[in-house]
Each structure stands twice: as C-alpha cells, then as structure tokens.
C-alpha cells in the first residue's frame, strides 16, 4: 500500500501563524487607541464601553478560530476547519463595523481593520478549499 500524500495546506498554516501575531498587535494598538479616544475625544461613555467589549470579544474569538483552523489543517480533519469558517463570519462583521461604523474612526483603525479583513478573507478562502480537499480525500478512502 502506498503512503498517503500530505493534504495539509502550507499557505493556510503560514497565514494562521502570522495572523496570530497580528492579532496580538491589533488588540494592543486598538486598546491604546481607545484610551486615546476616551480621554481626548467627546466619546459617549456607554458606546465606548460597548466598543471596547467588542474588541475584547474579537480578542477571545480569534485565538479559538485560529487554533481550530491550525489543528484541522495539521490533522487533516474537516470539522475544525468548518468551525473556523463559521467563526469567521461574525468576525467579518466586527471588523467591518470597526472599519467604518464606530463613533470615531481614526486612520490607524482603518489600516488595522483592513489588514485584519485581508487576513480573514484569505484564510476563509484557503480554509474552504482545504476543507473541500480533505472531504474529497476522506470520501475516496
């Protein structure tokens, strides 16, 4: 019996690795920007708290999503990658909100959220392709 070919996606794994580091930088910079906004700009207090809560939700969901995608890719399992795709959808909405719909949008907010959306879009696309490859390989086996 011939050895099974490796089906894991190296481009997906590289994106997941760098997105993990970007997330740390993203959260730190955005929280510092919110400190600036809260002290220097006439920010409504109730909205400031909700937007900071939104950033903390992103900070909680992203590592889980990245871990699921990485484990699914390394173990060539479809289910974690599907969960990664499902968790990507609300994150798209969150990044789009923080890109243009928060109370005060600074240039740094735009740059960071565009980078996050690009990372997420490529991971979404590669995750769908990788899940399809794994699913087809397991159907044939």
Image: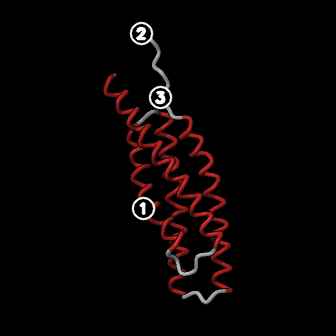
Question: How far apart are the two marked residues, 3 and 1, measured between alpha carbons?
Answer: 28 Å
Q: Which mark is residue 90?
A: 1
Tell which tag, 1 or 2, sits nearer the viewer. Answer: 1
Task: Give the x, y percent position of residue 84.
Answer: 44, 49
Tell which tag, 3 or 2, sits nearer the viewer. Answer: 3
Task: Give the x, y percent position of residue 98.
Answer: 53, 70
Point 56% across, 58% down: residue: 116
> Is 114 in front, or is 27?
114
Q: Report the residue marked by disc 3.
A: 7
Please give left or right for residue 91 compared with residue 111 in the image.
Answer: left
Point 67% across, 85% down: residue: 39
Q: Are marks 3 and 1 in contact (CB under 8 Å)?
A: no
Q: Report the residue marked by disc 2.
A: 1
Q: Residues within 10 Å of mark 1 (few under 14, many from 20)?
A: few
Q: Residues within 10 Å of mark 3 (few under 14, many from 20)?
A: some
The quadrant of the picture occupied by the C terminus is: top left
Point 49% across, 75% down: residue: 101
Return the disc, 3 or 1, that comes first in the chain's sequence.
Answer: 3
Question: How far apart are the two marked residues, 1 and 2, measured between alpha carbons?
Answer: 44 Å
Most extreme residue toward the top, as rendered? 1
Most extreme residue toward the left, as rendered? 139
Please give left or right for residue 33 compared with residue 100 in the image.
Answer: right
The quadrant of the picture occupied by the N terminus is: top left
Q: Is residue 73 above or below residue 92?
A: above
Colour theme: secondary structure
Task: Give the x, y percent position of residue 111.
Answer: 62, 64
């Amino acid at each position: 019996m011939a050895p099974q070919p490796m089906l894991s996606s190296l481009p997906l794994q590289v994106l997941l690795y760098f997105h993990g580091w970007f997330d740390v930088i993203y959260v730190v910079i955005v929280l510092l920007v919110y400190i600036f906004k809260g002290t220097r700009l006439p920010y409504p207090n109730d909205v400031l708290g909700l937007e900071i809560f939104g950033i903390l939700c992103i900070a909680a969901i992203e590592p889980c999503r990245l871990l699921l995608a990485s484990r699914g890719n390394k173990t060539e399992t479809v289910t974690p990658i599907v969960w990664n795709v499902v968790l990507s959808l609300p994150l798209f909405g969150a990044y789009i909100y923080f890109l243009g719909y928060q109370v005060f949008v600074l240039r740094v907010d735009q740059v960071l959220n565009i980078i996050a959306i690009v990372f997420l879009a490529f991971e979404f696309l590669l995750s769908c392709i990788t899940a399809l490859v794994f699913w087809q390989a397991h159907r044939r086996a």
